[in-house]
């Protein structure tokens, strides 16, 4: 549903109001047609929700160990049953019909625009938290809407985000759910969304900052007090792309500190994201890099089927 787009104002890079707690999100110099979003686990489901609700806003959708749109229908048993443990039973055509019906009711964006999105799907064949068939159903869902640019990667990993900086071996499923299978999930997804990239460079700690999220959610809602934003120095002068990264249920800083924000690899790519010479002009702007926003939720409110 459209209410899930709780950070739409960030995607459009409009200025924010002054908050009373932590620093507010600064005004971002973002190209509105160069916005992408990704998520791991429950964050992956949410990335799909947002892409369907506002298909005109997101050019790229990255789904890591996630699944299909509105799978649970707001039911916890369905979410933890069919969606996670028995995804082979998901009726894709029924969900496609639901999206079309929701559009007719004005509750989601035009599904005809979904075909313009580039979709990156990753799932581990040893994932026992959300079975890999969930991603196969997701791929079928996007193909039903005519998406041609779908990259689907299956590796023998457990449940987690694939990062060359991951703390655990490929087949393991443990905190902080960052697995090293020789797959650079951040880089591979961004390459699909934005084209060839320059070589990744180290992120700069000074460019990763916390911001107050209170203006983007209802009081007492699922958002935590603070989120993170990574803004390369060049993006303070030039217009930049924006990528929004959504963590999984047990990956908030309360649980894993900065492991997701720092080890996923997105920050390093944000620091170096330039298109190759000859195709580096976007909307009349020269070298275009990337801003990365990482909204965070409260651990005890990680119930995506209810949001």
Image: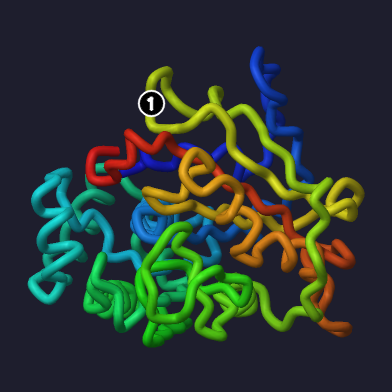
Q: Nearer the viewer, residue 45 or 174?
A: 174
Determine which residue is flagged by label 1.
Answer: 221
In percent of the image, x 11 and y 70: which residue is there?
86
* Residue drawn at the location 44% of the way across and 38% of the way down: 297
Horizontal relation, residue 84 to residue 185: left or right? left
In the image, residue 34 sits, relative to residue 131, either above or below, namely: above
Identify the secondary structure beneath mark 1. Answer: loop
From the top left corner, tell me how far across and down residue 227 is, in percent: 59, 38
- Where is residue 159? Give x, y as percent: 36, 69
For residue 75, above or below residue 282? above
Q: Quadrant of the C terminus?
A: top left
75, 69: nearer the viewer: 75
Residue at 67 percent of width and 53 percent of height: 292
Instruction: Indicate the quadrant containing the N terminus: top left, top right, bottom left or bottom right.
Output: top left
Q: Is residue 150 visible?
A: no
Q: Position of residue 241 (x, y in %)?
A: 71, 58
Query: Left or right: where does residue 128 sit relative to residue 40?
Result: left
Q: Using the image as rendered, state which of residue 149 and residue 176 is in the foreground.
A: 176
Q: Quadrant of residue 201?
A: bottom right
The image shows residue 253, relative to residue 151, as above or below, that is: above
**Is residue 217 rendered to the left or right of residue 27?**
left
Residue 1 shows in this picture: yes
């Amino acid at each position: 549903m459209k209410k899930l787009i709780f950070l739409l104002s960030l995607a459009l890079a409009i200025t924010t109001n002054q908050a009373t707690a932590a620093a507010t999100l600064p005004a971002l110099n973002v190209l509105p047609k160069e916005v992408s979003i990704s998520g791991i686990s429950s964050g992956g489901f949410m990335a799909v929700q947002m892409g369907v609700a506002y298909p005109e806003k997101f050019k790229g959708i990255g789904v890591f160990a996630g699944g299909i749109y509105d799978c649970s229908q707001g039911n916890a048993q369905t979410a933890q049953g069919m969606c996670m443990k028995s995804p082979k039973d998901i009726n894709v055509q029924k969900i496609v019909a639901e999206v079309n019906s929701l559009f007719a009711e004005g509750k989601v964006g035009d599904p005809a625009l979904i075909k313009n999105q580039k979709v990156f799907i990753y799932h581990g064949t040893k994932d026992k938290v959300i079975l890999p068939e969930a991603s196969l159903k997701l791929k079928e869902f996007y193909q039903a809407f005519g998406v041609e640019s779908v990259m689907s990667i299956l590796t023998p990993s457990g449940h987690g985000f694939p990062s060359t900086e991951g703390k655990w071996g490929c087949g393991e499923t443990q905190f902080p759910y960052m697995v090293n299978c020789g797959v650079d999930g951040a880089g591979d997804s961004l390459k699909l969304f934005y084209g060839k990239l320059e070589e990744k460079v180290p992120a700069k700690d000074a460019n990763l900052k916390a911001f107050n999220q209170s203006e983007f959610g209802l009081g007492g809602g699922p958002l935590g007090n603070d989120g993170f934003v990574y803004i390369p120095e060049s993006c303070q002068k030039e217009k930049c792309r924006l990528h929004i990264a959504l963590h999984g249920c047990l990956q908030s800083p309360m649980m894993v500190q900065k492991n997701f924000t720092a080890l996923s690899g997105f920050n390093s790519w944000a620091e170096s994201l330039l298109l190759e010479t000859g195709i580096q002009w976007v909307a009349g702007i020269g070298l275009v890099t990337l801003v990365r926003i990482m909204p965070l939720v409260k651990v005890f409110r990680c119930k995506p089927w209810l949001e």
